[in-house]
């Protein structure tokens, strides 16, 4: 995990000196700290690399190749090499899967959402994607196709909530097409090819972008749950699943991200722009709103979770809520202005705004 030192022969000195790269001392302290929490040096290396420490990229590349080999072994274990159907091991597992207790909370929760009767269908589709054999929902008749679609949507927690409908958000739109695309990436075995071609600078860029997205998703899902309650919108479970998966299995998530980024560059750029915008503008605004309730208690009744949730149910409800805010602002201008003057990191009132508030 530490770069080898450089042996130097400085002018005017007898003998040589050994110099480690800049930042090695901080890295060593971080390794010692992580060793108190984790036993695996591989897990420690990846955690520190995620955090921006200068882990040698030769180590990262070697671990990524090992991850690709493990993934390919898993794919071979899932299917019969000639027929591409599930192996005997998988068929036995699917027969017992309704009562098995998984270590991954998402799978256990998905079973509760879809029910034990439909859980084998949900799991079969996930395994088909992992094996690179998913071509879409059942195509024998419309009822079977629709039934599988509902099971997958429910398993991923993508059911549209009242808030989703009011905002015109449909998390299930093009879901089948997205799963087929993901399946095609897995089936084409692009990981090895990508690793052969990727530069060190691209490795670091992809890491930084993935970490940016995960940070945005984690803070966004926490803010939504805090603002309007759990399961307020269908995307929450998907956000949390991705963040937990990245925390547990960052190398495979990083490989998936890198290949997807290469294949769908325009869409990924738009996603990253939205993540940056949330972290730069949305999250600070929400943090300020929470602090406002602490320092200006009069805002508490207006900003309860129930009130905010109700305001998101329709456009008319939003307009009524905004009108209440405007009335509240007129009644508490001085308190609000004092708050912003104490917190210029969130908002800097203009001299005109300050004079207007003082005159009230």
Image (cartoon, rainbow, N blue to C red):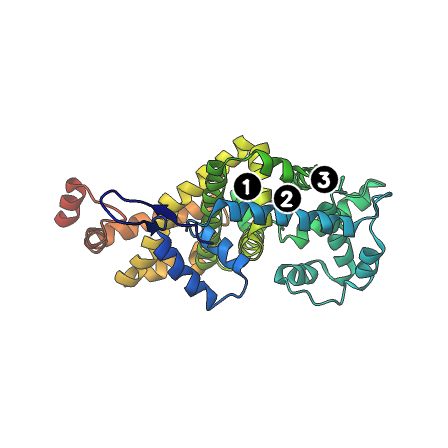
Q: Nearer the viewer, residue 8 or 139?
A: 8
Residue at the image point whose x is 19% and y is 51% from the top: 341
Q: Check the image and report above or below for 263 versus 49.
A: above
Name the outermost residue toward the front. Answer: 14
10 Å crowding of disc 2: few (<14), some (14-19), many (20+): many
Q: Position of residue 182 (x, y in %)?
A: 66, 41
| Residue bearing mark 3 | 187
Mark 2 or 1, which is nearer the eye?
2
Q: Label 3 neighbourhood size at 10 Å, few (<14), some (14-19), many (20+)?
A: some
Q: Secondary structure at mark 2?
A: loop
Q: Is residue 20 left or right of residue 266?
A: left
Please say if 136 is above or below 77: above
* Of the pair 352 and 231, the residue shown nearer to us: 231
Distance (Cα) linking label 3 and label 1: 34 Å
The residue shown at (63%, 59%) is: 106
The answer to whether the residues at label 2 and label 1 have Cβ atoms under 8 Å apart is: no
Residue located beneath label 1 in the image: 168
6 to the left or right of 88 = left
* Residue 138, disc: none
Residue 213 position within the rendered picture, expressed as x and y whole percent measured from the top left: 48, 45
N-terminal label among 2 and 3:
2
Q: CA distance from mark 2 to mark 1?
A: 12 Å
Foreground label between 3 and 1: 3
Q: How far separated are the C-alphas under marks 2 and 3?
A: 23 Å
For numbered disc 1, what is the local secondary structure?
loop
Position in image of residue 314 (x %, y %): 50, 46
Q: Which residue is mark 2?
A: 172
* Left or right of residue 80: residue 56: left
């Amino acid at each position: 995990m530490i770069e080898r030192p450089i042996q130097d022969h400085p002018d005017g000195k007898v003998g040589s000196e050994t110099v480690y790269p800049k930042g090695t001392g901080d890295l060593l302290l971080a390794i010692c700290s992580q060793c108190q929490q984790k036993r695996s040096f591989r897990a420690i290396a990846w955690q520190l690399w995620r955090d921006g420490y200068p882990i040698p990229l030769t180590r990262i590349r070697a671990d990524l190749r090992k991850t690709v080999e493990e993934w390919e072994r898993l794919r071979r274990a899932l299917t019969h090499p000639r027929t591409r159907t599930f192996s005997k091991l998988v068929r036995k597992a699917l027969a017992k899967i309704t009562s098995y207790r998984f270590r991954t909370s998402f799978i256990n929760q998905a079973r509760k959402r879809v029910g034990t009767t439909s859980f084998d269908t949900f799991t079969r589709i996930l395994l088909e994607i992992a094996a690179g054999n998913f071509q879409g929902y059942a195509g024998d008749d419309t009822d079977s196709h629709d039934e599988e679609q509902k099971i997958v949507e429910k398993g991923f927690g993508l059911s549209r909530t009242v808030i989703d409908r009011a905002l015109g958000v449909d998390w299930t739109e093009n879901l089948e097409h997205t799963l087929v695309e993901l399946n095609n990436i897995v089936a084409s075995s692009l990981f090895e090819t990508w690793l052969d071609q990727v530069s060190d600078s691209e490795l670091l860029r992809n890491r930084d972008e993935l970490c940016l997205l995960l940070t945005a998703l984690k803070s966004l899902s926490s803010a939504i749950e805090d603002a309007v309650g759990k399961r307020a919108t269908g995307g929450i479970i998907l956000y949390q699943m991705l963040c937990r998966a990245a925390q547990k299995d960052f190398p495979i998530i990083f490989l998936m991200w890198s290949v997807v980024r290469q294949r769908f560059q325009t869409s990924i750029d738009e996603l990253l722009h939205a993540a940056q915008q949330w972290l730069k503008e949305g999250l600070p605004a929400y943090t300020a709103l929470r602090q406002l309730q602490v320092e200006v208690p009069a805002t508490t009744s207006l900003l309860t979770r129930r009130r905010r949730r109700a305001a998101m149910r329709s456009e008319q409800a939003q307009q009524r809520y905004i009108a209440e805010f405007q009335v509240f602002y007129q009644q508490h201008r001085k308190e609000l202005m004092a708050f912003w003057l104490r917190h210029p990191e969130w908002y800097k009132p203009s001299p005109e705004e300050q004079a207007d508030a003082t005159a009230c």
